[in-house]
Image (cartoon, rainbow, N blue to C red):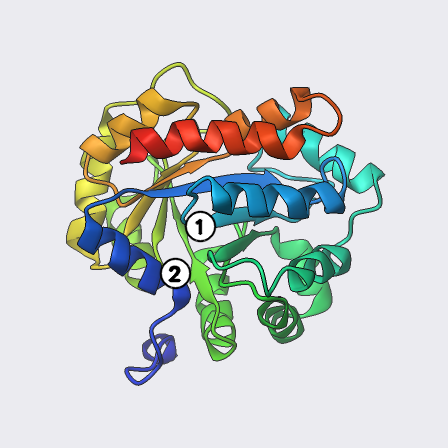
Amino acid sequence: MVDEMISPTQPISTIAQRFKQLNKDGRLALMPFLMAGDPDLKTTGDVLLSLQSAGADMVELGIPYSDPLADGPVIQAAAARALAAGTTPKRVLEMLSSLRNQLTLPVILFTYSNPLLNVGMECFCEQAAAAGAAGLVVPDLPLEEAERLSPVASRFGLDLVLLVAPTTPCERMSRIAERSRGFTYLVSVTGVTGERAKMETRVEGLVHQLKQSSTIPVAVGFGISGVDQVRQVRGWGADGAIIGSALVKRMASAASGSVASEAEKFCRELRAAAD
């Protein structure tokens, strides 16, 4: 049942808590994305801690998949490198679990539906929560399937974050915003992930539309490549900015042994723009 998706007595999630504090402070949530296992899981752990130190508010952590339909070439290449290095969902969760005493920021797992369904919705959510994840993003999961997964995730304290695209019809957009947990993920472009020279101005109207449909925060992703777009998203009234391809690209071009420091440097630049 849709009305069972969240209980009125359920404790506020760590993602909701973080957005609540950021809203009180008048700050935009800075939400970097990185691909787990690129170039290896030890480095991923180092980067997660570096991003936390540099002021990231939440991190979206990609689980590599062989057919990432929503991802552009930069993140596809990162997934391919991670898979070649032997990264599996189980190993990603083991790495995340090993950081539980050090990571304080919410980690949102980005995965496709096939790996999730292969493990089983309940089993995957239980394992993700045990590893310390705070939420899930499943970009290829239809709304109707999300309505099945959301209460399962909720039982384990995970927020299932749903995506809205510029091409989403208004009525369906409202349904998605009402059912998303933690925040609504607003895809700023029609197409796959990747850096863009500038963002489409119609995104501002979509931010306002979503805020009228639901009280939960709105985070904008896909196409944010640097400080200018972060400032633009903040000016449009969004609650968060998700930066993926630009960070992944910088990490890929960093010299061996300096990936974490390069990620930290870029995150500090973005933090200054978000504030």
- In which quarter of the view is residue 273 placed? top left
Q: Residue furthest toward the top?
A: 197
Of the image marks 1 and 2, the number of the one nearer the N terminus? 2
Q: Residue at x 65, y 58 (%)?
A: 96
Residue visible at 84% across and 37% down?
84
Q: Residue 200's spot in the image, x, y percent?
A: 30, 22
Q: Quadrant of the C terminus?
A: top left
Q: Amino acid at mark 2?
A: Ile
Alpha carbons under labels 1 and 2: distance apart: 8 Å
CB atoms at circles 1 and 2 under 8 Å apart? Answer: yes
Secondary structure under tag 2 reads: helix
Tell me the residue that label 1 is attached to.
58
Frontmost residue, 24 versus 237? 24
- Identify the residue at the far bottom of this view: 9
Q: Which percent across, then down, holds residue 17?
A: 32, 64
Q: Residues within 10 Å of mark 2 (few under 14, many from 20)?
A: many
Along the viewing direction, whichever of 154 and 133 lies nearer the viewer: 133
Q: Which residue is mark 2?
A: 15
